[in-house]
Image (spheres, grey):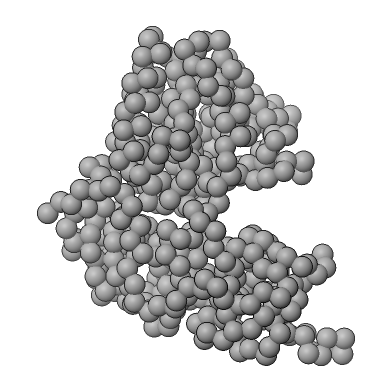
Amino acid sequence: MRHAPDLLRIATAGSVDDGKSTLVGRLLYDTKSVLADQIDAVTKASVDRGLEGPDLSLLVDGLRAEREQGITIDVAYRYFATPARSFVLADTPGHVQYTRNTVSGASTAQLVILLVDARNGVVSQTRRHAAVMALLGVPQLVLAVNKIDLVSDQASVFAEISAEFAELTRSLGWSDEQVTSIPVSALHGDNIANRSENTPFYDGPTLIEHLETVPNLTERAPVGLRFPVQYVIRPRTSEYPDYRGYAGQIAAGRVSVGDEVVVLPSGQRTTVSQIDTADGPLETAHTGRSVTILLADDVDISRGDLIAAAADAPEPVQQFTATVCWLAEKPLRPGVRLLLKHGTKTTQAIVGGLDALFDEQNLALEQAPESVELNQIVRISVQTAEPIPADDYQVNRESGSFLLIDPQGGNTLAAGLVGDALAPLHLKELV
């Protein structure tokens, strides 16, 4: 992976038994990203099951329960690379009850591979996953029409499924340039790494060729620095008697020595005097880099504060609209008091009202529900005890997302998006 020039974050999604784990195993196998002893172990396990060849899905379904049932339960993260690019892939579950895991796996993806079984076409779970991807703002989709070898009239089946999926994605706000359809057989490797002679009707790229060449889109629009302060470093030693640095990871944008910044929520302005790392000082650091920032002025900063570019800093808010995916068995009801975690800041919050429920099957908004059940997506109003410097999710994913947490047990209850993330989806209003 050290030879690949850039990184693309991808995820898989699809209905149960559409072949997601087999596809991921094939990607790992064809890019030579698995060790020989792993292949030997998978081959032996496959022979014990009475299979003629290695079951590549076993490279991904690592949990014993998954192997016994032949399904994916949790999100499995895998890493592979080609000479052109390196990849982090999240293999997400297909069952309806694990939609929350799909949300988690796809939340940071720059591209999602959505699988359908060529024999079944676009099903309800396909529509559900496409709607979730649209809600999360995933910039690019690949429709992998899998098991194409199991249908007779392959060309017409592929054309029909692609057309139906294109109609769905257009209604969710994607352009045709953002969606690519590829006929594949994950089991046999058709159109994964090598172009297949079994699909003469298809003249597009293989899946890996597409992954290598697709634009690496990280943000819808460039934003300035967003740096949540994780830790204040003050050694107070004889060597560093006056050192005061602010450590964390750059969530968005970049920072350079001399940049004017604002500390939120206090609003104090200053400039960056130094950028330190474990490898030495830098003049400029970019998104994803863990650094320690030193400022020209003595500013009161603590964990949970945000250092942002002065030119486009977000306005701290205490009351806002949000879209959440409910992740807990216990229903969400209005008026509940929870903890809200945004970046490195955690504060108390109240869910004021449940405004509208997202019906992902009919691509519609239902009237305000009395409660929200597991896996449902809803637009809510939130009030926090302290102001949080959040961007709208449509502006930036990292600084526009948050978690709702159970104050008693500490469990994560919901994944939230600041603002009305449902607005860009062309939805019907149901009463």
x then y, percent, for residue 181:
45, 28
In the displayed structure, would residue 317 be above or below residue 49? Answer: below
- Residue sitting at x 23%, y 64%: 355
**In the depicted view, which residue is nearer to us: 275 or 54?**
275
- Residue sitting at x 57%, y 31%: 210
x then y, percent, for residue 98:
39, 47
Residue projecting furthest to the left: 431
Indicate the quadrant containing the N terminus: top left, top right, bottom left or bottom right: top right
- Residue sitting at x 69%, y 26%: 40
**In the depicted view, which residue is nearer to us: 31 or 387?**
387
Indicate the quadrant containing the C terminus: top left, top right, bottom left or bottom right: bottom left
Q: How many marks?
A: 0
x then y, percent, for residue 180:
46, 31
Quadrant assignment, res 380: bottom left
In the displayed structure, would residue 219 be above or below residue 14? Answer: below
Inspect this view and state whether residue 251 appears: no
Residue projecting furthest to the right: 239
- Residue sitting at x 66%, y 68%: 255
Inspect this view and state whether residue 13 appears: yes
69 vs 34, left or right, is: left
296 vs 219, left or right, is: right
Quadrant assignment, res 236: bottom right
In the displayed structure, would residue 72 be above or below residue 274? Answer: above
